[in-house]
Image: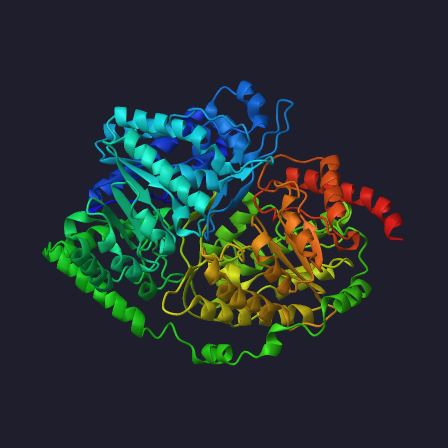
Amino acid sequence: MITQNLGYPRIGAKRELKKACENYWSGKTDVDSLLEEGKRLRAENWKLQKEVGIDLIPVNDFSFYDQVLDMSLALGAIPPRYSEVLLEEDNQLDLYFAMARGYQKNGFDITAMEMTKWFDTNYHYIVPEFYKNQEFQYTSTKAVQEYKEAIALGVEAKPVLIGPVSYLLFGKEKEEGFHRLDLIDRLLPVYCAIIAELQDNGAKNIQLDEPFLVMDLNEKERKAFQSVYATLAERFPEISFFLTSYFGSLGDNLNWVLELPVAVLHLDLTRGGNEVVSSLESAPSSLRFSLGIVDGRNIWKNDFEASLLLLNEAKEKVGENRLILAPSCSLLHTPFDLDNETDETTLPLEVKNWMAFAKQKIKELKVISNLASGVNSDANKKALEENKKAMISKKESKLIHKEKVQYAVSNITPSQSKRNSKFTDRQILQQESLRLPLLPTTTIGSFPQTKEVRLLRSKLKNASLSQDEYNDAITTEIKKAIKWQEEIGLDVLVHGEFERNDMVEYFGEQLDGFAFTKFGWVQSYGSRAVKPPIIYGDVDRLEPMTVAWTAYAQELTDLPVKGMLTGPVTILQWSFVRNDQSREETTNQIALAIRKEVVDLEAAGIKIIQIDEPAIREGLPLRRADWKGYLDWAIKAFRITASGVKDATQIHTHMCYSEFNDIIESIADMDADVITIETSRSQMDLLDAFVDFEYPNEIGPGVYDIHSPRVPNAEEMENLIKKAADLLPIKNIWVNPDCGLKTRGWKETNDALVAMVSAAKSLREKFQVEVS
């Protein structure tokens, strides 16, 4: 069986791309240096896959920021507000980054494009913007240039493009009176131009990613797929199109997708594999199948014996010559190389032996291919035996199961997931206790993680700084942060989270059942990479995790300081999760651990506690029929964490870059006293769901986009607050940034928050009269 890969991590083994981009953005390097680093990283990825023996290697899976944004630039889908940047900048890359990050220089002040989550992952993409009479044009030849680059290096290259229908579905209409799929006839000629140029340069196989095929599709969407692929097949009879879906099974879409005129259909066997294989024999005899047998979303080793059983069934259905083996999806969602992990104190050797990163996964793919094809060399036999031992070790390990934790989860009572009183009663008690002004101002939690702060953690780890010295340094940072917040006039303060490396990793390091990597970075958006913890066993909190730092900060001020925690669903979603029990069971274990921390914070005198759950929407199953089951346990888990406190203690939660319309009732069922959400990039459009539902609790709609370096002025933020006030009861509105400020610099943070406080105070006087 031949093998193909769908995509490879682009940030580099040690985040080289992150550093290269950030050096360019800061002016430390020029565009040629950045382009050269991108070229080097691509070449390394291709060489690695070629040496392993992958038969079809993806190109154009590399991106300096995001693959959807790459497609927007290639298709000329550039929002009109960037037309001046087109004239101002002398290279296409600066326009590209302006679309992603905003543009604030040379007299221009242009907002960034909206960003949202990629299906149910923690990867973010830049949302295309569409207009009724939009024209597309072939603007960027990146796909062709990278294909030629790979061919010159002797790579059996397979260009990757986001498919036309999914590209339109990824976007948003920016004016009324049309549906974005109405643009397909204008869009398709530009796709044909790109494909024609790839063909002219020798491409015979082209991967078209259409992940929306695993979603609930209506008749209009189905017809769009059928029309597009009929056109492409007629226009390019010599091209083998690899129609690629992932993150789920095709379900009720399978029958008509099997009839599409493509050469290869990729199927994700890690989700619904048996069901998929049983349907293969109903396909046309000309159709070949790419079977996603290796999990591209998690870091556990493939079970070779289980995979071979599935492949043997597939061979019986359609024959070996019609099968191609692949990861389930792009390996973008996994870390680079497990061989770089040598610290057994954070990643025990026993746990490491159960794992595989991107480099190991393509090796697994080749071994499975050999074994399935009967290539029984000594090396393949050895690999199979070692794999069997790893599977047995994981099943029998004493590291995984803790009877105390399992007993606590099995005995969760209804009262543990319910506050003592309804919100309206709690709100009165909280107002009496906190005495906050109208339009109270706060931040989401974190402040800039400067080089100096990160160096403190590094020195502590390598023992060049004692624990006492480290604590003194963090204490100093907290003191400065509290004093500064008081000076600029914030109403509810935070301690700044200077001691935290990451909002999930920090908690995982203090919870039992977690392991950690040193180089296990995964791209979240742009240059932002996260290092997900690994949940391998039952989760428990052994001692308080945040109480000391938060209580210290509260001692420094008479203003309320928020306790800052990460919620159980977000810890689950942003970790690599064990695959030997249900996600619900694991989430409940985490919820009970966080509940202990919430109770201890209240006992330490903290009156406001924020339990961040930005991943609630992200974790929603892709098919609507599966939503209720997930939401039932996900919302219950949040309530378990929050319901151990008195009514006067105010519980906040935070969510960012999510569409809330379809789940607003469940958001309300979380029963958080205050929810803060991202709304600045959407210009408050995301509030519509809360307004239509008549959301009863308090809301902090973000007025400052922290994912862009541009600093909004007070007038801009006032206008956003006014928009919110037109939609919501003024007494329920908070004023805050969209998200934490960890990735920003101090100057821009200061300037933006001073403007934010000024905007809130200016409007406070006006609205106070109306409330009175």
Q: How many labels does the image show?
A: 0
Residue 340 can be seen, yes or no: no
Residue 143 can be seen, yes or no: yes
Does 595 sit above or below residue 518?
below
Instruction: Report the front residue among 377 and 683.
Output: 683
Q: Position of residue 760 (x, y in %)?
A: 77, 45
Does 174 sit above or below residue 613?
above
Q: Position of residue 714 (x, y in %)?
A: 74, 37
Quick check: 752 left or right of 544? right
Tell me where residue 560 sits by quadrant. bottom right
Does 107 sit above or below residue 251?
above
User: In the image, what residue occupies the spot 42% across and 49% down?
Assistant: 521
Does 231 sit above or below residue 280?
above
Quick check: 256 left or right of 448? left
Q: Position of residue 645 (x, y in %)?
A: 67, 72
Quick check: 732 left or right of 160? right
User: In the image, what residue occupies the spot 23% across and 45% down?
Assistant: 287
Tell me where residue 578 sits by quadrant. bottom left
Q: Where is residue 456 in the image (x, y as percent from the top left)?
A: 54, 51
Instruction: Report the front residue among 367 and 211.
Output: 211
**What colouring method underlies this structural image?**
rainbow
User: In the image, what residue occupies the spot 56% across and 37% down?
Assistant: 173
